[in-house]
Image (cartoon, rainbow, N blue to C red):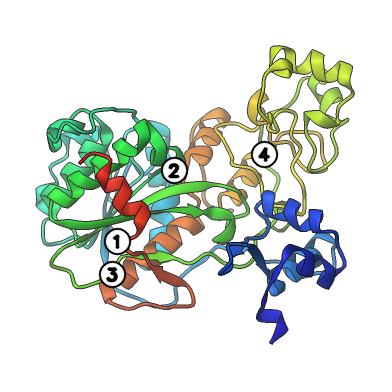
């Protein structure tokens, strides 16, 4: 059937009566995905490009924004480290996991967790002080979005000594002491290339030394029911006595727009612009940035940044109703990473920020407004946490839904090259 076929750029453009450059622009904006055919040419799914064309031309009335929850119940248990405001923890709960313990050091984030889930066992302490051996034989999954402390000890073959003092070490220690069936680590995409790949290779080597089989994948949130372009590196480790493949969620063929997420968001507190900045941002159209300003204002507003290289598209950036948001940071009014409302001339407010991270409206954030923005911006999107949980459940249950999940090949060329990085 033609709707399920993949077409080249020119054919796809002709089929929906747009220019080939429009197709290329959609791909560049991560609104659609390309794959490579047998001749290594980019091809596009016709269903997908028709869907985005209808959305961008306001011909589609379907709202794809939703917070995902599993209908199937399991008795799998989990520990969530570096829990923050609860994005991953809530996602795992929505996937059916029961938390034995959560750990977080930031007092406002701890207050957020306890306010929303008073029955959760939240430990407010330095992770280094926790004895994980008490959970041995009791926990199925340990998940940790260990903060991105840089280290360059790779290549010394010192095992734990190579990473001691880092928060990844504490994650690995939890795995060593509790011996979960599955462990999931999460970090920024940049970890993939840190120190020429040696940092990630060291992490994988250490987990393998603990008798786990390990793989990794960069997950793109905009293709996993999150209205935001946010890439996260996910490391999955399975205890070697568990007879299961490493499973990751499969990307969808659609994205969710900012408009779908926030058009009916409740009113909430938020940052504001000065009169001077508001006058500048009023000149920027939806989806626009500093390039849409008059040149004189560009130079005045951007200062020295105007003369630097790079796209700088986060500066004076107003979001578009029709596209996923750019990655949310710790505040929507930072000069380099502006996140202005698509229509009103103001930064996104707290509830809009939370919607884009797929937190439910009833999830309350504690602390000052700036602390709430930071908690939300640092969180793993709840729906991404859900998909990580669904993959972990599939591993634990020994099942695979080929429509929504995929097995990662441990012998892939990229993975073997990474392991050779510290050989």
Marks 1, 4: nearer the viewer: 1
Q: Are marks 2 and 4 in contact (CB under 8 Å)?
A: no
Report the Cα–Cα distance between label 3 and label 1.
12 Å
Q: Identify the residue at horizontal 53%, vertical 64% (top origin).
A: 251
Whichever of labels 1 and 4 marks the residue nearer the N terminus, that label is 4
Q: Is residue 8 above or below residue 218?
A: below
Q: Is residue 300 above or below residue 16?
A: above
Front residue of this view, candidates 321 and 290: 290
Whichever of labels 1 and 2 marks the residue nearer the N terminus, that label is 2
Q: Position of residue 364 (x, y in %)?
A: 52, 46
Whichever of labels 2 and 4 marks the residue nearer the N terminus, that label is 2
Report the Cα–Cα distance between label 2 and label 3.
31 Å
Marks 1, 2: nearer the viewer: 1
Circle 2 packing at 10 Å, graded few (<14), some (14-19), many (20+), is: many
Report the Cα–Cα distance between label 4 and label 3.
42 Å
> Is residue 308 found left or right of 402 in the rendered image?
right
- Which residue in the structure is indicated by mark 2? 85
Q: Identify the residue at horizontal 49%, vertical 77% (top origin).
A: 403
Q: Tell me the element at label 1.
A: loop
Q: Position of residue 174 (x, y in %)?
A: 18, 46
Q: Is residue 313 above or below residue 397?
A: above
Report the Cα–Cα distance between label 1 and label 2.
36 Å
> Which mark identifies residue 245?
3
- Which residue in the structure is indicated by mark 4? 349
Q: Tell me the element at label 2.
A: loop
């Amino acid at each position: 059937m033609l709707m399920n076929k993949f077409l080249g750029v020119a054919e796809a453009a002709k089929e929906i009566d747009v220019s080939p450059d429009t197709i290329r622009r959609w791909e560049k904006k991560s609104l659609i995905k390309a794959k490579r055919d047998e001749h290594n040419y980019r091809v596009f799914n016709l269903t997908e490009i028709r869907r985005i064309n209808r959305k961008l031309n306001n011909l589609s009335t379907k709202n794809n924004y939703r917070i995902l929850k599993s209908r199937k119940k399991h008795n799998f248990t989990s520990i969530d480290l570096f829990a923050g405001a609860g994005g991953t923890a809530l996602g795992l709960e929505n996937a059916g996991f029961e938390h034995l313990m959560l750990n977080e050091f930031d007092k406002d984030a701890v207050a957020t967790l306890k306010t929303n889930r008073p029955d959760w066992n939240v430990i407010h302490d330095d992770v280094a002080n926790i004895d994980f051996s008490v959970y041995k034989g009791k926990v199925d999954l340990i998940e940790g979005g260990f903060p991105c402390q840089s280290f360059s000890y790779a290549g010394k073959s010192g095992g734990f000594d190579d990473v001691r003092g880092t928060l990844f070490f504490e994650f690995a220690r939890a795995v060593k002491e509790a011996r979960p069936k599955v462990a999931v680590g999460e970090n920024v995409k940049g970890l993939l290339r840190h120190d020429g790949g040696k940092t990630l290779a060291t992490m994988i080597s250490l987990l393998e030394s603990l008798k786990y089989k390990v793989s990794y994948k960069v997950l793109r949130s905009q293709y996993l029911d999150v209205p935001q372009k946010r890439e996260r590196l996910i490391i999955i480790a399975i205890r070697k006595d568990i007879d299961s493949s490493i499973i990751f969620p499969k990307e969808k063929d659609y994205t969710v727009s900012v408009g779908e997420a926030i058009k009916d968001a409740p009113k909430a507190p938020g940052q504001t612009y000065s009169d001077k900045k508001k006058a500048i941002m009023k000149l920027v159209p939806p989806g626009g940035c500093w390039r849409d300003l008059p040149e004189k204002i560009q130079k005045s507003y951007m200062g020295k940044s105007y003369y630097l290289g790079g796209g700088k598209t986060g500066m004076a950036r107003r979001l578009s109703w029709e596209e996923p948001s750019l990655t949310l940071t710790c505040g929507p009014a930072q000069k380099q990473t502006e996140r202005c409302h698509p229509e009103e001339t103001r930064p996104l407010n707290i509830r809009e920020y939370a919607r884009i991270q797929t937190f439910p409206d009833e999830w309350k954030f504690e602390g000052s407004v700036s602390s709430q923005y930071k908690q939300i911006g640092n969180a793993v999107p709840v729906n991404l946490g859900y998909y990580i949980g669904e993959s972990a459940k599939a591993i634990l249950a020994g099942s695979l839904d080929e429509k929504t999940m995929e097995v990662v090949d441990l012998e892939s060329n990229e993975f073997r090259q990474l392991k050779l990085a510290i050989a």
